[in-house]
Image (cartoon, rainbow, N blue to C red):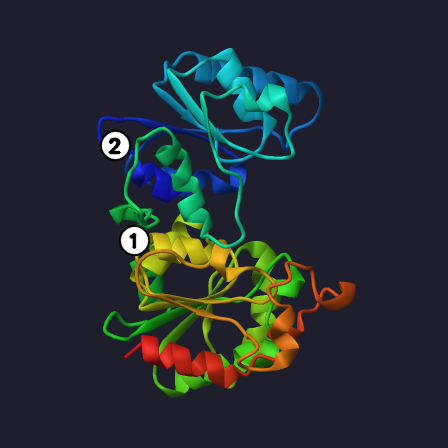
Amino acid sequence: MTSAISALPQNYRYVDIVCLPESAAIFKMHPRVRHVFVMPRHLKGLVKVFAYFNFYKRIAVNSYDLLAHFSNDWRGAIIQRLFPATLSVGRKTHRRGKFWHQSFDALAEGLDDSRPIVEQDVDLLRAVKLFNSKKAPPYLVRPSSKQRAKIKSWLSQKSILAYKKLVVIHAPSRWKFKELPIATWVRVIDALKEKKFEVVLCGSNDDLLTNQAIFASCTKKPIITNNFSLSDTAALYSLAHLVLTIDSMSTHLASATQTPVISIFGPSNEKNWGPWGGKHRVIALTTENSPTFACRPCGKDGCEGSKISQCLIQMEPDLIIDEALKMLR
């Protein structure tokens, strides 16, 4: 969605965002964003009721020229009904009825599996004649100079020297069917370290066990981040020469910092969710590799309900290593 923010005409001076807690830090790093209103859906009971009251109260004090609603969440229609913007646009969806669709002045077409999500987000602005280009702008987040200085200091403390090329790897996922085998990452990291590249394994605290398992098996040890916020991670990506990641938010965060990125896809559709803008590569097995992979992208959580994706299990480490070395030349 940061691409759609960049696509807005410059006379839209202030941009306010309504989002879920896990996305707030990303939008705060976009230079055009003024306020980020976080939906308190994680709360329960009366606490949640009062939190939503304050949430809507904060929105109500503003007067908006445009409301663009990018999901099919019912709250967008409620906000437009309660505090109507001069112009509003949503997206057609079979999941909502007449009340929802009639809440908006204009509607973009529904989601399409054959096009990048970033282009389909910008379609909302195209639907109300606010963006006419055929190609959406790049994603954009801009870590602060203070944040970058903090991470530069951390890298220095870890003896990662500024003149050496830095590769940041995001290997874990909350969805195991998106993960590569630990042995694959070990081969990749050992190969990169053999070529004298610095390697950092990043992730949230929830990812630490996976990163530690990779670390333990590496002959040449990478550095592991610990207690990094999303803002810290964005700053780290902005200082890297390459981000190597599975299909995850890291793909888009790296793209948004204008850092070269290789994104590794299994069952998900790279045509929808691949990196956007800047220098990037997508690695995914297809029928060119083997007729076995005619089934992908299937969008399923593993093969036959196993939570394991053979299109990732069978991916040769050398395929990843070769692409990484090409990007690092």
**Looking at the image, which residue is at 45% across and 52% down?**
116
Q: Quadrant of the C terminus?
A: bottom left
Q: Which residue is mark 2?
A: 9
Rendering coords of residue 182 (x, y %): 60, 76
Position of 155 relative to 13 (above/below): below
**Looking at the image, which residue is at 46% across and 48% down?**
117
Q: Which residue is mark 1?
A: 148
Asked which quadrant contains residue 269, the reply is bottom right
Foreground pick, 158 / 263? 263
Residue 63 can be seen in this image: yes
Pointer 2 or 1: first along the chain: 2
Q: Amino acid at mark 2?
A: Pro
Where residue 21 is drawn, which disc sits there? none
**Horizontal relation, residue 173 to residue 149: left or right:** right
**Looking at the image, which residue is at 34% across and 71% down?**
166
Q: Amino acid at mark 1?
A: Arg
Rendering coords of residue 55 (x, y %): 52, 20
Q: Nearer the viewer, mark 2 or mark 1?
A: 2
SS for dot 1: helix
Q: Quadrant of the N terminus?
A: top left
